[in-house]
């Protein structure tokens, strides 16, 4: 279990209103020009370092939808969808930043494509 710093605890406490906000965000994004979707897998020290929680938080800040989860082989995988510039910002974060205690060795992106509408209404952690 990740220790929750004060800022993260505040984020966790605000999750319910953010979900409602994200539904409106997803609807607004669906009319904001070309949408992109990309799958990702992050390699390195990315489990046990709050990587999923920070990924969810960053995705919501940037304004993209999708999901993130741990894999049995010690990586983190997921999908990001949204306007191309926002998806690119999230790709950069997944490649270079991550959570404070993580170490990203590499990030693989695959199945990048233009989509006509978002498949998700928010960004979530899968188990």
Image (cartoon, rainbow, N blue to C red):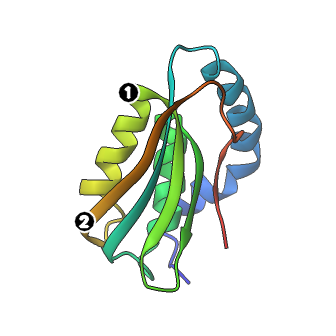
Residue neighbourhood size for the residue with mark 1, other residues' Cα within 10 Å, grouped as few (<14), some (14–19), many (≥20): few
x and y percent of residue 21 in the render?
71, 33
Residue neighbourhood size for the residue with mark 2, other residues' Cα within 10 Å, grouped as few (<14), some (14–19), many (≥20): few
- Contact flag, marks 2 and 1 (Cβ < 8 Å): no
> Tag 1's secondary structure?
helix
Q: Earlier in the sequence, mark 2 or mark 1?
A: 1
Left or right: 16 as drawn, with respect to 61:
right
Left or right: 95 as drawn, with respect to 1:
left
In the rendered structure, find residue 57 and report the number of the disc placed on it. none
x 38%, y 75%: residue: 46
**Where on the picture, by quarter, is residue 103?**
bottom left
Residue that label 1 marks: 85
In the rendered structure, find residue 106 and report the number of the disc placed on it. 2
Left or right: 117 as drawn, with respect to 1:
right
Which quadrant of the figure contains the C terminus? bottom right
Which sits in the foreground, 3 or 41? 41
Q: Is residue 24 above or below residue 80?
A: above
Q: CA distance from mark 2 to mark 1?
A: 21 Å
**Where on the picture, by quarter, is residue 12?**
bottom right
**Where on the picture, by quarter, is residue 24?**
top right
x and y percent of residue 62 in the render?
46, 36
Which sits in the foreground, 88 or 63? 88
Count how many numbered circles sit on residues in the image: 2
Which quadrant of the figure contains the N terminus? bottom right
Tell me if residue 6 can be seen: no
Q: Is residue 25 above or below residue 80?
A: above
x and y percent of residue 63 in the render?
53, 34
């Amino acid at each position: 279990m990740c220790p929750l710093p004060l800022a993260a605890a505040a984020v966790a406490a605000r999750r319910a209103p953010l979900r409602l906000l994200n539904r409106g965000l997803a609807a607004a994004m669906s009319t904001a020009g070309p949408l992109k979707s990309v799958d990702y897998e992050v390699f390195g020290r990315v489990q046990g370092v709050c990587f999923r929680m920070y990924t969810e938080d960053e995705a919501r800040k940037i304004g993209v939808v999708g999901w993130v989860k741990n894999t049995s082989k010690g990586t983190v995988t997921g999908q990001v969808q949204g306007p191309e510039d926002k998806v690119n910002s999230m790709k950069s974060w997944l490649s270079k930043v991550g959570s404070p205690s993580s170490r990203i060795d590499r990030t693989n992106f695959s199945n990048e494509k233009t989509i006509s509408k978002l498949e998700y209404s928010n960004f979530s952690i899968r188990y």
